[in-house]
Amino acid sequence: MKRITIEPISRIEGHGKITIHLNDEGHVAGAEFHVTQIRGFEKFTEGRPFYEMPGITARICGICPISHLLASSKACDAIMAVRIPPTARKLRELVHCAQIVQSHALSFFYLSAPDFLLGMSSNPARRNVMGVIADYPELARDGIELRKFGLQVVEGLAEERVHNSWIVPGGVAKALAASVRERILSELPAAKAIIERTIPLFKRALDNYKEEIAVFGSFPTMYAGLVDAKGNAQFYEGNLRFRAASGEIVQDQIAAEDYKQWIGEASLRESYLKAPYFVPQGFPAGVYRVGPLGRINAADGCGTPAADAELREFRERFGTVANSAFLYHYARLIEIVYALERIEALLNDPQILDAHVRATAAVNALEGVGMIEAPRGTLIHHYKVNEEGAITWANLIVATGHNNLAIGRSVQQVAEHYVDGAKLNEGMLNHVSAVVRAYDPCLSCSTHADGSLAMRIQLLNAEGALLDEIAN
Amino acid sequence: MKKVKVATVWLDGCSGCHMSLLDMDAAIISLGRKIDIVYGPLVDAQEFPEEVDVTLVEGAVSSQDDLNKIRKIRQRTQILVSLGDCAVTGNVPAMRNNIPVNKLLQRVYVDGSEEKKLIPSDRVPALLKHARPLREFVKVDHSLPGCPPPAKAILGLITELLEGRKAEAGQPVKFG
Ligand code: SF4
């Protein structure tokens, strides 16, 4: 048995590596997806005051810090047993939608566009955002501008782009200024125009990727995401729904505090990232996927006109439940449309400038769970505290964790299709990395990152001796 | 003019410092005329190149892998910059330092799992006892504190370095 290692997987948020096992004929016999570091937030936060948790856990991830701020603040709201003011709820959703726009723009334009535009097997030295800037300056500028739009909304509300102190237990720290509202509304049309230009481009490009669509993690699983009472996809509120690949709703309206009844966690020998599974089906049978594709598959619709029109077209083409991980990219673009529509609706809400945005209270419950949809999927923060409000126990289930089992299987499927152990080349292995990229996994969130950023592919024999090596 | 070779490295950090770097927005386009990003999370780089002019490092040194990497990077880099509080002081990653590593792993993978209660051991790197700042392991030429350092401060430092001036510290920074 021989082994190929891809380390690290480049152009993803964080560091992981892939091991591909080859049999004696050089065919792929198995594959593993490893997350290579762990920070231990669950342990070292013990003893901290609960109201510090949003600020500390935001440092899990600099790409979607707002997701952690929100899930953590929701858990803290539950510990204080307060219902936050309605305007605070709307402002939290607003800042969250802005974060989804920036995070999806980063994934699509900066990290994955180099594969679509320059080619999966193109020169790796140029296959990056700088290459896109050189060859497709207009599209690159669109991507930069769209990410910037999202971040400027964040900045307008929360003052900081990365780690803000605005989202707090009980609501938000400050009301929205009328001038900021006007500014964002005036910038919205340009952001919408960008996504309206990008989606047709992507749809045309899809025809070149029929093969990838067929083998990039293309297998039936369950899908999960938050939905409202009508079954529309939600980013900030709502309860969790699981839908089977057949379209049947397996479980609906699971409230945050009941998550443990449905989601179990398994440790894996080969990864610092644990693997959640759907409890009724057990481990490892209870595989499900979250994130953009998980959400649009789980929900009945978005509830906003432009996103629903895109979603209808998507479903006509790929079915009500789409099973290829390649389609995460497509789902991400639909969600940008949805987020922009929500931003507009929320800004036009007559209550949005209301000054009452924060509830205060001390500890009124010794346990709290917060659940939201981060850009990459369902995020759960669960805390227990003592009477003084010091954390005694914490559990975090991050978006990428839910996808852990499915990413592992997808890597195997792509490796079986593209990798030939007898004549390795870089393009083959970039395909394997690209399927991981499709999930946009945030390994920073998953545990945290490890540093090696080069991609080295080694072919080892059973004793671990190096048989062949290529660097991209 | 020869382009300056810049690398960015991500050790034990949250990527927030890298995000702040991207927060220069469109300035990256004009910067792209003066620099080549030869290594980092944004590019499909090769092995860390033999000769790099400027390397920005985010994050603390937390695992044996981190340590091997930073030593090699130091040898191959002209100017090494600690980017952000994790690299400069240890910051959030160092919050685990008073907890024995096995207790930490036990809590997460054994007590924190319903199935397969085991500590990962196959092809995953070992953690160091403590997460420590860069300067405790290698010589650091510039430190840019902040969690994260503001985009302007990062762009400012890069510009200064490109012009061959010695960068001034003391930019406004914050945590929380
Ligand atoms: S200094 Fe702050 S922003 Fe930078 S990596 Fe560390 S926690 Fe993240």
Image (spheres, helix red, strand yellow):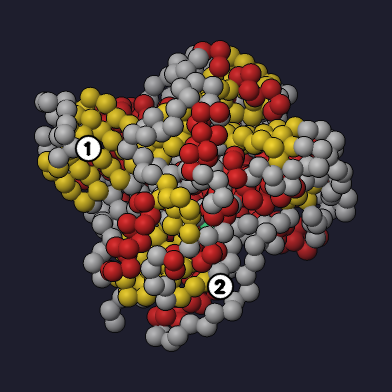
Q: Which mark is residue A4?
A: 1
Q: Which mark is residue B152?
A: 2
Classify A218 as above or below A137.
above
Q: Quadrant of the N terminus of chain A?
A: top left
Query: Which residue is located at x 53 percent, y 40 percent?
Result: B104
Question: Residue A135's image quarter?
Answer: bottom left
Judged from the image, the quadrant occupied by ligand 1 is: bottom right
Is B82 situated left or right of A127 in this image? Answer: right
The spot of residue A98 in percent (x, y) is 63, 50
Looking at the image, the residue that sits furthest to the bottom is B165
Bin the neighbour count of mark 1 within 10 Å (Cα to Cα): few under 14, some 14-19, many 20 and up: many
Question: Residue B91's image quarter?
Answer: bottom right
Mark pair 1, 2: CA separation: 42 Å
Disc 2: residue Cβ within 8 A of ligand 1's nearest atom? no
Classify B36 as above or below A330.
below
Q: Mark 1 falls within which chain?
A: A
Query: Which residue is located at x 80 percent, y 60 percent?
Result: A177
The spot of residue B105 in percent (x, y) is 49, 37
Disc 1: residue Cβ within 8 A of ligand 1's nearest atom? no
- Is residue B43 visible in the rendered structure shown here? no
Secondary structure at numbered mark 2: helix
Query: Which residue is located at x 77 percent, y 46 percent?
Result: A169
Query: Which residue is located at x 75 percent, y 32 percent?
Result: A367
Is A75 situated left or right of A421 in this image? Answer: right
